[in-house]
Image (tube, rainbow, N blue to C red):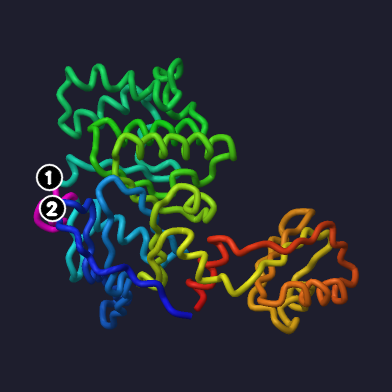
């Protein structure tokens, strides 16, 4: 399969929020006695641009290099080689200037102080960013209202639910009115309603003209929010395009979707052996199982499925167009 490559850059550095060129990062680990060492290449020549005002997605499996890329762009880690510019500034030489103009949202519990209130958290980070007190006094209540924490702002954060903490993360990231916001898996672990609210806040930030770099493991989320998406695998960008452009990579296949009862790994192996099956993705953890089969001959495969389903009850079956998740799986596996 041909990899989608980023078009040659035609914009000036002033028009870009992020510019990354041949970025590499190596980690050296040594044995207990320091006699031997091993070099691990986390980034192997990453190149991409993010336009000002763009909502850009960076997706990839665990260990692909997403977190390393984010840490370099937020000045938390230095690259081994290559160049990276954030808002026109060099990540190696203009660390403090960059930090004043960006916001960072981490998924989960990181980055908040649980034993103080939401307002005290906000005041601390406002001071850390050097925001004028006369501005922060007005901005903090406005942000508390924006993220729906009004009435709970004076409760200690340790009493907050996971969703409330994530709302506070977003409010905290906006306290310095940043031009560029990094959202590192902002909806991870949230219930559907909480995740929906966070996505709505992300859309609002985009309407304000903020540049956003989003990492997520949820393909539907990337498809719904992002204008362009870079897929990273084994430290390299393997594709970069719009969601619809990435989905065109799998236009040659259809997806057979099954809802089953009593499916086992043995049944999944039988599905994989059917002629014409490219890939099988199965969730066997719950009482009702969900199985997706990628194939260019969906009707024929569906007929074969019913023949090998001994002892497995097929509750529902359908043939659908491939999604961004199907394109993603093909890219990272091939």
Q: Which disc number belongs to residue 97?
A: 1
* Residue 285 drawn at (x, y percent): 71, 58
Q: Secondary structure at mark 1?
A: helix
Q: Nearer the viewer, residue 322 or 129?
A: 322
Res 105 quadrant in image: top left
Mark 2 to mark 1 CA distance (whole Å): 8 Å
Up-down: is 87 above or below 271?
Answer: above
Q: Does the rendering let one see residue 107?
A: yes
Res 27 quadrant in image: bottom left
User: In this figure, which residue is indicated by the disc labeled 2?
Assistant: 89
Q: What segment carries the magenta color?
A: 87-97
Give the residue displayed 20% in from the left and 70% down from the top.
80
* Residue 92 drawn at (x, y percent): 13, 58
Q: Are marks 2 and 1 in contact (CB under 8 Å)?
A: yes
Give neighbour class at mark 1: few <14, some 14-19, many 20+ (Cα, 10 Å). some
**Magenta segment includes 183:** no
């Amino acid at each position: 399969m041909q990899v989608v490559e980023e078009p040659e850059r035609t914009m000036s550095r002033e028009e870009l929020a992020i510019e990354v060129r041949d970025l590499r990062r190596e980690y050296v680990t040594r044995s207990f006695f320091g006699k031997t060492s091993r070099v691990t290449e986390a980034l192997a020549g990453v190149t991409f641009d993010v336009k000002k005002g763009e909502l850009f997605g960076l997706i990839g499996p665990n260990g692909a290099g997403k977190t390393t890329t984010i840490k370099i762009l937020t000045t938390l880690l230095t690259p081994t080689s290559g160049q990276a510019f954030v808002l026109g500034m060099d990540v190696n030489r203009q660390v403090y200037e960059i930090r004043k103009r960006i916001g960072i949202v981490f998924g989960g519990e990181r980055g908040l102080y649980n034993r103080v209130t939401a307002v005290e958290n906000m005041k601390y980070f406002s001071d850390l960013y050097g925001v004028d007190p006369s501005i922060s006094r007005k901005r903090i209540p406005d942000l508390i209202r924006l993220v729906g924490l009004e009435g709970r702002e004076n409760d200690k954060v340790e009493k907050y639910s996971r969703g409330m903490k994530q709302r506070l993360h977003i409010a905290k990231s906006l306290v310095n009115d940043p031009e560029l916001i990094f959202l590192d898996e902002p909806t991870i672990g949230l219930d559907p309603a909480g995740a929906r609210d966070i996505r709505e806040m992300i859309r609002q930030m985009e309407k304000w003209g903020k540049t956003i770099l989003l990492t997520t493991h949820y393909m539907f989320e990337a498809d719904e929010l992002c204008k362009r998406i870079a897929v990273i695998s084994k430290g390299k960008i393997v594709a970069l395009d719009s969601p619809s452009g990435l989905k065109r990579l799998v236009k040659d296949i259809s997806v057979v979707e099954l809802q089953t009862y009593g499916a086992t790994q043995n049944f999944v192996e039988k599905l994989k052996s059917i002629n014409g099956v490219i890939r099988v993705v199965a969730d066997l953890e719950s009482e009702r199982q969900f199985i997706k089969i990628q194939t260019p001959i969906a009707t024929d495969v569906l007929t074969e499925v019913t023949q090998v389903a001994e002892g497995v009850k097929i509750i529902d079956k359908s043939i659908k167009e491939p999604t961004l998740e199907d394109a993603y799986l093909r890219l990272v596996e091939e």
